[in-house]
Amino acid sequence: MNPQISFITLGVQDLDLMTRFYRDTLGWQMEKQEEGVRFFKMNPGLIFALFGEADLASDIGLKNYQLQPPGSFKRMSLAMNFDSMAKVDVFFATLKQKGVLIQKEPQTVFWGGYSGYFMDPEGNFWEVAYNPFL
């Protein structure tokens, strides 16, 4: 058995706002939409989903779940890798043109790659990197 990640589901407070960000700002194609959840097809075999935070907590079976305060750190990041530093820079330039909050400008990092971070409208961090070892 070789388990692999097939879904990444992000619990969000404003499903419509977050859908617009990932669809319109990042240009991701929405694969499917159901009541309270949106699906974006990513790499082969991987789906990125947006699910209302309270609904996701309920689906998990959490009782008395407290919504995260806006801007609170969620102890995780998501990442996208490009095959060159130049492509990372172009992606960040596009994000800036669209008014996306850049948390950390791309720069050479300790592990030998090149990366920066941006934040989506609900404070989820995305690393955008060039990793010469992949």
Image (tube, helix red, strand yellow):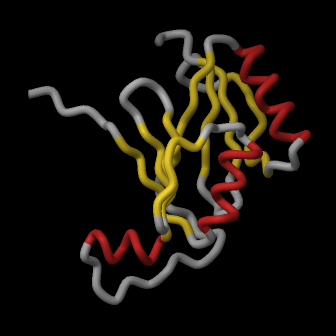
The residue at the point 18 percent across, 33 percent down is 3
Q: Nearer the viewer, residue 119 or 15?
A: 15
Q: Can you name the residue that lies furthest to the left here?
A: 1
Relative to 37, residue 106 above or below: above
The residue at the point 48 percent across, 68 percent down is 36
Q: Nearer the viewer, residue 125 or 91?
A: 91
Q: Position of residue 44 (x, y in %)?
A: 41, 24
Q: Position of residue 25 (x, y in %)?
A: 76, 45
Q: Can you name the residue that lies furthest to the bottom here?
A: 64
Q: How many circles with numbers are drawn on the protein?
A: 0
Q: Nearer the viewer, residue 41 or 71?
A: 41
Among the 4 quarters of the image, the one containing residue 94: top right
Q: Position of residue 81 (x, y in %)?
A: 57, 24
Q: Can you name the residue that lies furthest to the right here?
A: 97
Relative to 68, residue 96 above or below: above
Relative to 86, residue 58 above or below: below
Q: Nearer the viewer, residue 89 or 42?
A: 42
The residue at the point 87 percent across, 44 percent down is 98
Q: Quadrant of the N terminus?
A: top left
Relative to 62, residue 120 above or below: above
Is 36 left or right of 59, judged from the image as shown?
right
Is 127 left or right of 31, judged from the image as shown?
right
Q: Position of residue 115 (x, y in %)?
A: 66, 28
Is 2 left or right of 126, judged from the image as shown?
left
The residue at the point 60 percent across, 66 percent down is 15
